[in-house]
Amino acid sequence: MTGIRQTRIVARPILDRCHADRDDAEANRARWKNPEARLLLVDPHDEVVMVDGRLAAVPTAGERDDQRDLFVGVVEGVPWFARRTEQSRPEACSLRTVDLGPTDRELVMSALAALAWHESNPACPRCGKPTRITSGGPARICPHGHRVFPRTDPAIIAAVLDAQDRIVLARQHSWPADRRSVVAGFVEAGEPAEHALVREVAEETTLTITSARYVGSQSWPFPRSLMFGYVARAAGTINVGHDELAEADFFSRDEVSDQVESGQLQLPPTLSIARALIDAWLARRLPEPESGFDLSSPLR
Ligand SMILES: [Zn+2]
């Protein structure tokens, strides 16, 4: 598997979100004044500057603007803040494609999700009045005291396997000809995630999911998704006869490895759960779908 980098879903949080006092102005002032404190600058296009493979944050300086400098959390005693900048920086790279270690990944996902949510929620959903950021940044509040908390959009993503353990890799219309990923889609209002899995796979490929096992989740803050990752077994043949996908096919492990090696196939960025699922499948480290839910008969 030369050329394929192993990724993994991190199960234990590294970032301490400081629930007890993250809205305490004094505590946040002390964090901002901490000489070790870091400020992550995020460009308008979700880009950050990297140095030697790590996030290049700047020291905090001057007085904190609590409507601009969000408190993200503490990592190993170091407080982290995030700020959206108005200017792009030529040396910055896209967060969708950078290769980040677990700590930086968690910092970036949390910072970006919070920034995106604040920017898209200027008004209170209950009374329509303008909202402002609470001191730390985990919520917004309107003049009537209504507190608004961050929302995420649930989505399913699945390593869909056939009886020979081949994986479905699909290409969306907007992607380059060599790019493929696993099947994914949003959970609809009132829909359990497992129903969304069965429905999305059927809609996109006409395959029938017979069994599935939950693997793990990942925040994907572009702008505010939470991906629920599954491994699933499917019956039937692939038929991409509509608007959702350009193409979809079953791939064996050798086919994926060989085509990645030769440059014919481009897998999702290492930051994504899509890539983690594909890498885990390649390494034969996904659980058996049959060890989870039996979806061969309709769910009630
Ligand atoms: Zn309100």
Image: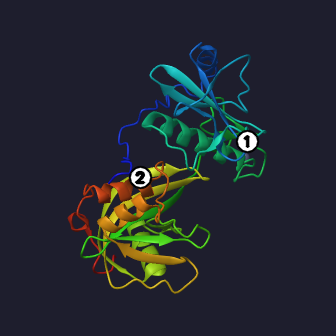
Q: Is residue 15 left or right of residue 223?
A: left
Residue at x 23% of width, y 63% of height: 288
Q: Which residue is mark 2?
A: 217
Image quadrant where residue 34 sits: top right
The percent position of residue 141, horizontal first and vertical second, equals: 69, 40
Quarter of the view holding residue 165 = bottom left
Instruction: Tell me the CA gap for discs 2 and 1.
Output: 32 Å
* Amino acid of disc 1: Cys
Query: Residue placed at 58% from the left, 52% from the top?
Result: 224
Pick the front one: 151 or 260 = 260
Quarter assignment of residue 40: top right
Q: Is residue 165 above or below residue 261?
A: below
Q: Is residue 149 visible?
A: no
Give the secondary structure at mark 2: strand
Task: Tell me what residue is drawn at x 48 percent, y 38 percent.
Answer: 106
- State whether residue 153 is above or below residue 148: below
Q: Where residue 74 appears, x then y in whole percent?
A: 50, 26
Tell me: residue 264, above or below residue 25: below
Q: Residue at x 63, y 14 (%)?
A: 33
Quadrant location of the N terminus in the rendered image: bottom left
Queried on whether the Cβ of the residue with tag 1 lies below 8 angstroms from ligand 1, the answer reads yes
Residue 36 x %, y %: 56, 16
Residue at the farthest front position: 262
Residue 197 can be seen in this image: yes
Most foreground residue, 149 or 145: 149
Q: Amino acid at mark 2?
A: Ser
Q: x, y (%) of residue 274?
A: 44, 58
Q: Which residue is mark 1?
A: 142
| CB contact under 8 Å: marks 2 and 1 | no
